[in-house]
Each structure stands twice: as structure tokens, then as C-alpha cells.
Image: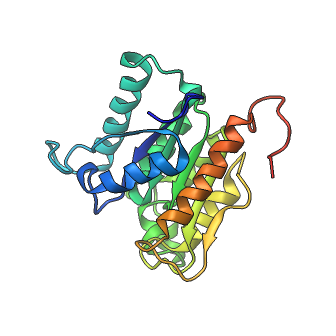
Amino acid sequence: RNDHTGLTILYSHGNAEDVGLSMPYLDMMAKVTKTDVFAYEYLGYGSAEDSPSEENCYQSINAAWDYLTTKACMDPSKIVPFGRSIGSGPTVDLCSRHTGTRGMILQSPLESGARAVFATWNPLRSAPPGIDIFCNYNKIDKITCPVFIMHGKADNVVAFSNGQNLHDQCRQPYDPPFFKEGRGHNNMPDDECLEEVAKFLEALRKGWGQPGAAQQPS
């Protein structure tokens, strides 16, 4: 535990990862941001049973949320969900349904499964939700908490336009977003990213984004 003000990051990892592989990064996250970090595993990943699927990702983050808010008796306004890559799917879904979260962080997020791959191919960018998966573009404008987005401009896995477009749709975007020149999907600089996350969390601690609060701190 690191954060005496009570904030906790609820972390959703990327596709080619699991919680075990993420432990060094999670330790670094807690130290740099001086914030408690709660990570969970998706059903079908790592040692978790079942098969990977969109629905199982949603079920998994719901279980993590229920644990924090019910068993750990944590105030939802002290929770900041953070999704990386495919983890943006369950993170955006959760925050679109639970309006009490204090903030949301997305790194290399996808607008949807199809838009991540076919960023400029209009027919596939318009794939119906029944065919497409993780349709964050249909949910992001329902999120009322402050949102901080990071993305590499040279990302050839989830095109940079995904992060840019989601930022533009946010009701309370944190500015500036961290859009890194020359970096792709898997080589975003962890130290710089987490320093930017720390700045965002500090703005939240100062009250930014709450009703009646002053404008975003510089």
C-alpha cells in the first residue's frame, strides 16, 4: 500500500500478458505513482480457467470491481481503472456502467477490435457491434470521470488514430494526452508513461474533475 489519500488503480493488462508477467511493471507502477495497485486476471489467461473471450474479460473486471467495492469496502470514488491495449475494453465498459469512478487511464487503447486493425478501411470501421468486439467508441462518451490517454504515434498493432479518436470523444479529457513520437505498441517508455500517470493522479487528488472543482491543474 502506498497512497495515504486512498486512491487505488484497478489495472487491466494487455493481450500478450498475464498478471504474473506484469508483476515487475506493477511494482514499478505502485512506486512511481505512490498509489495502491490492484491487478486481476482475465478468465482464460495465465492460470485462470475457461477460454479467452470478450465476455470473460467483462466478467473478470466485474469480479474485481465487486471485490474492491464489496469485500474490501472501497469507495468507488477512490478507484481509478487503468487499461492497457485490450485491457481498455473491460476498463471502458466498467467505467461506462459505474459513474462513480474517480478517473480512468488508457494506454494504447482500441476504439474496437476492427478499428484497431483496419484503422482507415471504412467498411470495417463501421462493422456492427454484433460482429465487432470491444466497441469502446460506443461507450467512451458515457464516461463522466476524467480520462487520461497515452498512445505511441508509431503503433502498428493498434493504430494511433484509435487513441486520438477516443481522446476527442471524452467528456472530461485530461490534457495534454501523452502521445509519444516514434514509439509503437510494445515499446512505450514505462518510466515516462508512469510519470505522466502520476501527474494525472495528482490532479485527481487536488480535486480536478469533481463537481464544482476548478479547472485542470497545470
Q: Tell me if I can see residue 88 in this picture.
A: no
Q: Is residue 140 left or right of residue 68?
A: right
- Point 61% across, 40% down: residue: 103
Q: Is residue 172 left or right of residue 165?
A: right
- Point 36% across, 17% down: residue: 71
Q: Is residue 118 left or right of residue 78?
A: left
Q: Tell me if I can see residue 40 in this picture.
A: yes
Q: Position of residue 79 (x, y in %)?
A: 53, 32
Q: Position of residue 18 (x, y in %)?
A: 26, 53
Q: Nearer the viewer, residue 140 or 190?
A: 190
Q: Position of residue 119 (x, y in %)?
A: 51, 74
How are the colours assigned in the image?
A: rainbow
Vertical placement of residue 211 versus 218, above or below: above
Q: Position of residue 47 (x, y in %)?
A: 14, 46
Vertical placement of residue 179 versus 24, above or below: below
Q: Nearer the viewer, residue 215 or 100?
A: 215
Vertical placement of residue 38 versus 46, above or below: above
Q: Splitting the image into 4 quarters, where does residue 165 fall?
A: bottom right
Q: Splitting the image into 4 quarters, where does residue 177 fall?
A: bottom right
Vertical placement of residue 191 versus 100, above or below: below
- Point 43% across, 33% down: residue: 1
Number of dots carrying numbers: 0
Q: Nearer the viewer, residue 28 or 55?
A: 28
